[in-house]
Amino acid sequence: MRFSWPWGKKSSIKPKILWVDLGDLGDLVHPSGPHEQWQDHGLGLLRTIMHNHGILTDLVSTRAVTAWEQLAKQMQGYEMLLMNVRSYTFPVGKKSAEIFKQVNPNGIVIAGGMHATVAPHEMLAIDAFDHVVQGPGELTIVDLVKDPAAYPRLVHGVGAKSMADWPMINRELWPKPVGWRIKRRWKWRWPLEPECGWGPGPVATILTSRVCPWQCVFCNENSYIPNMGRKPVDQVIDELNYLDRKYGIGSVVIHDSMFFQNPKWLREWIEKYPRKTKRWTYWAAGRADTVRQWPDLFEALVRETNWRTISIGFESGSDRILRLLNKECTEEDNYFTIDLVNRLGDELEAKGEQPPKFWSNIMLGIPGETPEDAFKTMRMLKRMKRVFPSISYYAPYPGSALGFQLIAEGKSLMSQDNYHRYPDDEKVKGVDYQFYRDLLAGKYDDEINKGLHGVTRGAELYQGTLVKA
C-alpha cells in the first residue's frame, strides 16, 4: 500500500457494503459549530484502501439525518455494515448497529476504532456487533470484509509499519453537508472543511503522526496504539499541494495528537514547508515541556512556517494536579511557554505580521482538585496575551489509567449508555460542579486576580468557553 494518487471511476453497480459515519444526529444538517463538521480520517483511510482494492462501499451518516427512521431507510438492502467507533460515539454506534440488524436481519456488522481497542468487552457485550476489531485495521480490513467467517469475533487488527505506506485519502469518500444553507453559512467548500476561527477556509485537515508517546493518566493512547513511522515531510507537502490544486486551501489543521516531536522531522519541515508550499497558516499541537526543551526549534517553526494556532495541553496551572495527571510538565514549563509565545506574538505584531495564538487545552473537575488549584489554572490562562480557551470538565473514558480507576471505583457518571461530549454535564461523582460553574461565571474573579501581577483581564476571557471533553 504505497502512496497512491487519485482514484478510478465510480461503478454503477450498487455496493453490498455500507459504512456509517458516526456523530450526533443532525450535525451535518444544523450544526451548532464548525467542529461538528470535522471529518473522520480513520473512515476516509479505510474506505480509500478498500476502494483501491476494488471493494466499493456506500456511505450513510448519523450526522446527516435528524431521526433514526431516516437512517433505517438508508440502511435497507445491504449485507455488511462497517463503522469506526470512538468512546463518545459508542452509544450512536450501538444504536446504528441495532437498526442495521433490524432492517437487514442477515447482515453482518463489523466495528473497529479506539473504543473497540480500549474497551472491547463493552463492544462484545452487544449482540449487534458480529466482529470487533481491536487495534489498527489498514492491513486487515480488505481480507476481513472479503471473508468475515474466517475471523473470530474479536479480531486483532494489523496496521502499517509507517504512515508512508498509507494511500492518500480520497476525501470525496467523506460525508457531505446536507443542503445549500449549511454550505453557505459555514462557507463550506467540501470535501475540505469549514473554517473555525483558526485560519481561513477551506481547511485541509491532515495527519503527519499517529501516536503521542507520553503516558498521561487521562489519555494513554500510546498504551493501545502501536508505534508507527511518521509520514515523510515530502509526502505531506505533496498531499497538501495536490489538495490545493484540486480544491484550493485556505489554511491547514494538523490533527496529530503531538505535532511538536521528533526534532529531525521538524527541522526538515522548517526547511521545506515554506519553500515548497504556499506557507498556509496552520493549527498544530505541542507540549510545554518540549517547547522549553527545544525553544529555538519551536521559535523557528512559528516564525518560518507560519504556525499560528498553537495547541498546548496545559491541562492545569497547578504542579500538584500536573503530577496527579502524570503530565510530566510543570508550572514552570507552562509559564516558560506562555511567555515565549507572548514575546513572539509581540514581535511579529510589531512587524505587521499575524501573531500566534494559543489553543489552550484546560481540564477542570479533576478528582482531587482544590479551589486553589483551579484558581492557579485560571491565573495561568490570564497570563496568555492571545488565546482561544478550550476548557472541559475531566471525563473518565475507558482506555486511560485514571478513567479505568474511577470506573472500577464506581465514581464515573458516564457509562456505555451515555458516553457523550456535552460540555456542561457532570462526569464524576464527588466533584463540586457548582463551584466550577460559578468559577466560569466569574464569581471568583477577585480571588483569582489577587494572585496576578499586572494582568487586568476579567472573567470574560473564559466565560462560555466550555467545550466537549
Image (spheres, grey):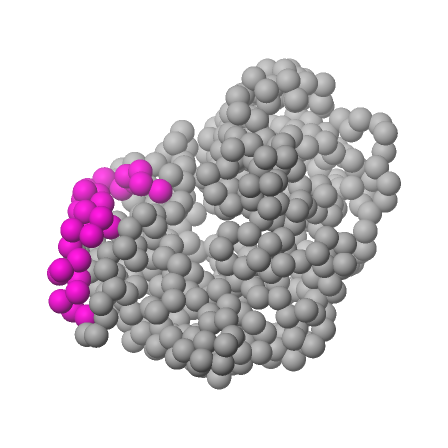
Count of numbered labels shown in the rendering = 0
Q: Residue at x 36, y 73 (%)?
A: 338
**Vertical order, 299 against 95 (above or below):** below
The image position of residue 163, as x and y in percent, is 67, 60
Q: Nearer the viewer, residue 328 or 246?
A: 246
- Is-magenta flag for residue 431? yes
Left or right, 467 with respect to 186, comes to left
- Is-magenta flag for residue 100? no
Left or right, 392 with respect to 220, comes to left
The image position of residue 144, as x and y in percent, is 71, 37
Q: Is residue 380 visible?
A: yes
Report the magenta residues as a range. 423-452
Q: Is residue 239 visible?
A: no
Q: Nearer the viewer, residue 170 or 114?
A: 170
Q: Residue furthest bottom?
A: 296
The image position of residue 304, as x and y in percent, is 58, 78
Quarter holding the N terminus is bottom right
Q: Residue at x 45, y 80 (%)?
A: 350
**Vertical order, 392 against 176 (above or below):** below
The image position of residue 296, as x and y in percent, is 48, 84
**Vertical order, 92 against 390 (above or below):** above
Dividing the picture into quadrants, the one containing residue 239 is: bottom right
Q: Residue at x 51, y 45 (%)?
A: 34
**Vertical order, 430 against 343 (above or below):** above
Q: Residue at x 82, y 47 (%)?
A: 7
